[in-house]
Image (cartoon, rainbow, N blue to C red):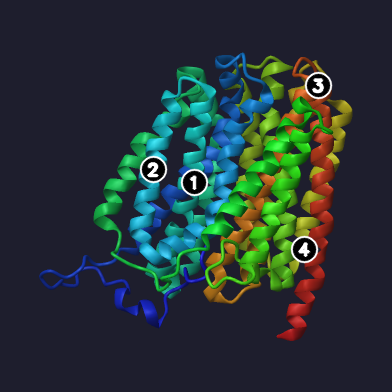
Amino acid sequence: MSSSASPPSASTSAAAPVAPGTPRAPGAAPAVRPGLVLLLSAGATFIAFLDTTVVNVAFPDMAASFPADRVSDLSWVVSSYAVLFAALLTPAGRVADAFGRKRVFLLSLAVFTLASALCAAAPDLPLLITGRALQGAAAAGMIPAALGLLLATTPPAGLAAAIGVWGAAGSMASAAGPSLGGLLVDAFGWRSVFLINVPVGILLVAVGLRGLPERTGTERRLPDPLGTFAITGGIGLLVLGLTKGSDWGWASGAAVGCILCGVALIAVSFVRSAHQAAPAVETALFRDPTFAVASAAAAFAGAALFAWMLSGPLFLTTVWHYSVLKAGFALTPGAFTSAVAALAVGKRTRPRHLPVVVAVSMTAFAAVSVWTWSQLDTGPRFLALWLPMGLVGGAAFGATLTALSTAAATSLPPLRFASGVGMTTTARQLGGALGVAATASVIAAHGTDGARAFREVFLVCAALAAVAALIGLGLTRTARTHTEES
């Protein structure tokens, strides 16, 4: 996400919001309507983040539709979305600034809608994964363009509230994902979780064509193409090597080669980005220690979160033999506490308390994951085990991710707020893609016919959360440094 996606300033005053009822000269551009821009931005953000959660509930039904495919291959339905979403967020922001945020927003939304239809109609797994990759790439274009439009059209007095609503859209998507997915899959099958995006996307595009301002950014440089290719290919190869390692053999040339090449390409992208005027990755943001620590913690928290979200529906349907609908509702309490905790932290927590929020929340999740690892068995124990685990885990992630996003954004100057949000989201999505790969690898190694594989996944989640908690404590030191400097 480009740093030029910034709050209203002198450079954007020509398109400042116009008071309702003000007459418009013939041929003049339509008056900017901040409320409509907020609605469209939040709507696009909702469906983009909904597709990171709703698919997890549909995963068992997809596995039944493609019985010849391994879990490690099926996991790419989740991973391909996360990889493209993570890798293209920053370059997509610069493309939006160069070609116009409205144009990129609506084009990305249209591609997302078409890709959703492709996923719904996919006759085989390769085409489904292709559709999901297109969805992820389109979502990466929607998010920075939507935020850029929102920041540029909202009056300064209402900016904080608008950003809060925009951010809450993602939390509400997480809360709605399990129950909505369970209802759709139970009634219409897994294809319906993609098909529902089509009418919503068409409506948003139609309204956006008439209601969004004709606004272009000030950035005219396209992102470094080689760096963009390197970061995208590097993440893809790294996730591929981790996902297929158990199938190929961890010592095999294919697994080792994918992992090493992936790491090398990511390193190339970072090195190039440090010397590019329009980098593929905003590496300059990492010079701020608070931002760097928050992004590192977001990567580990994202890995634990995505692993947790993917393993839950699989465990409930394959080990406890819940229906998809029952599994969706079993996951809803955790999604609800996640949304509540996110809103509470966003509204009430002061900056100096953010390190404590991250450390306590991730420590709590690590502890409840270890407890789940020790207690999980083939006999269903929803009230005694699953419900408390879900409630604690959901609240922990809602609080942590909101605290990390807030810490990252507030550590930067206002002009770089959008870039900070984008890079933190990239770190979380990258960690999530690796978490999905690790989950698929563990399950593929042990099968899904018992609780052992899932116990190990929860142990991995505990370790990742513990690392996130330790990194989060580092925010205390960086926040103190910021205070002393100011």
**Dot 4 surroundings within 10 Å: few (below 14), some, or many (20 or more)?**
many
Question: Looking at the image, can residue 274 be seen?
Answer: yes
Picture quadrant where residue 227 is located = bottom right
Give, as a three-letter code, the residue at label 2.
Val
Mark nearer the N terminus (4 vs 2)? 2
Q: Position of residue 386 (x, y in %)?
A: 75, 29
Direction from residue 3 to residue 396 in the image, left or right: right
Mark nearer the N terminus (4 vs 1)? 1
Q: Are marks 1 and 2 in contact (CB under 8 Å)?
A: yes
Asked if 256 appears above or below 374 in the picture, the reply is below
Check disc 4 and report its element: helix, strand or loop. Answer: helix
Asked if 112 appears above or below 381 in the picture, the reply is below
Q: Position of residue 89 (x, y in %)?
A: 53, 55
Q: CA distance from mark 4 to mark 1?
A: 32 Å
Residue, disc 4: 355
Residue under the image location 55 percent in, 15 percent down: 65
Badge number at residue 137:
1
Picture quadrant where residue 354 is located = bottom right
Give, as a three-letter code, the residue at label 1.
Ala
